[in-house]
Amino acid sequence: MLVAVPDAADATAQAEVTRAQAVAGAVLTSRDWVNTAPNELRPPSFAEAVATAAREAGLGVEVLDEAALAAGGYGGILAVGQGSEAPPRLVKLTYTPEGGGNGKRVALVGKGITFDTGGISIKPAQGMWEMKSDMAGAAAVGAAMLAVAALKPSVAVTGYLPMAENMPSGTSYRPGDVITMYSGKRVEVLNTDAEGRMILADAIARACEDGADYLFETSTLTGGQVIALGKRIAGVMGTPELCERVRAAGDATGEPAWPMPLPDDVRKGMDSDVADISQVNAGMDRAGHMLQGGVFLREFVTDEVAWAHIDIAGPGYHSGEATGYWTKGGTGVPVRTLLHLVDDVAANG
């Protein structure tokens, strides 16, 4: 497509074209990672793919392997990954603006379960193949960070991508286990298929420790999101003001999202007799299942950090025919939203 503009507008037009190319490239990269067969994209190879692309883009890269995760006390990531022969990883990507930017720090956190069988709490066989997309959150964050490196916003941005493969084996974590997380909190495991929140909790705690002002986390976390909001609209939970900014960003980018509550009674239902919190409702009641995910993650966000959890269980992968710019397979959601939010914080704090 050829776009003709007056000479006076050339610089502005070029900037918009550059941005469009960076955003579109990030969406396509995210889709490619999500669509990769799960035997070809396990935690070590996914981490290497992201790290290689990030280094080429000029980002700072830190990859924690299983030994570093154990030394650092990342109990949630290790627990989920211990059933697989492909060990877990945590990838940290760092963008620092010239001159320090506006002084604000944004953290992007994405769930990277490269394949989710459910573990010992195993999923039904029908449709399990689609769980290759359970790393769509990490794919979106990794790809968005590549665009951040190209666009150079005036705000510091750090991406955190916890990666694991949730498999049943003799070394898998079990219902009844109590896991000490990176934050020091102890979690009672009741369902090994609620694994995403376990790895995210460690990454969120690390992001808060590193000094984030704003934390945007995205994950294919719960089937409850699809039941409540369908396959096109993400659920958003967290700090009310930040949830509204996510909703507005989604509207602006064609990636709709809707704020959801974090009720006190849902948290009460997750009380544990043996730990600080149960991973899911202590009675295994699935009512408000999407909200349980958000309530759990809130436990690992420090008070001074504004945060938003974006559940993309439906929007992250499209199994129907292509429509609009939604391709069949990985959609790239919410790359556009994340980049819009980064620009928002850069401009408005």
Image (cartoon, rainbow, N blue to C red):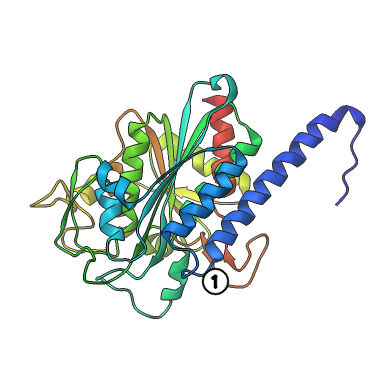
**Which residue ends up furthest to the front in the rendered image?**
67
In the figure, residue 32 lies in which quadrant? Answer: bottom right
Q: Residues within 10 Å of mark 1 (few under 14, many from 20)?
A: few
**Number of numbered discs on residues:** 1
Label 1: state its secondary structure: loop
**Which residue ends up furthest to the top in the rendered image?**
99
- Judging depth in this view, the residue of 199 and 62 nearest the camera is 62
Instruction: Give residue 289's position: percent from left, percent from top.
Output: 31, 59
Residue type at the position of mark 1: Ser
Residue 331 visible here: no
Instruction: Give residue 76's position: percent from left, percent from top.
Output: 27, 51
In this rendering, position of residue 129 left or right of residue 184: right
Q: State the residue at coordinates (37%, 63%).
A: 86
In the figure, residue 9 lies in which quadrant? Answer: top right
State the residue position of label 1: 319
**Would you place residue 120 above or below residue 108 in this image?**
below
In the figure, residue 169 lies in which quadrant? Answer: bottom left
Residue 76 visible here: yes
**Would you place residue 134 above or below residue 156 in this image?**
below
- Judging depth in this view, the residue of 164 and 248 nearest the camera is 164
Q: State the residue at coordinates (30%, 52%).
A: 77
Instruction: Give residue 81's position: percent from left, percent from top.
Output: 31, 59
**Would you place residue 170 above or below residue 160 in this image?**
below
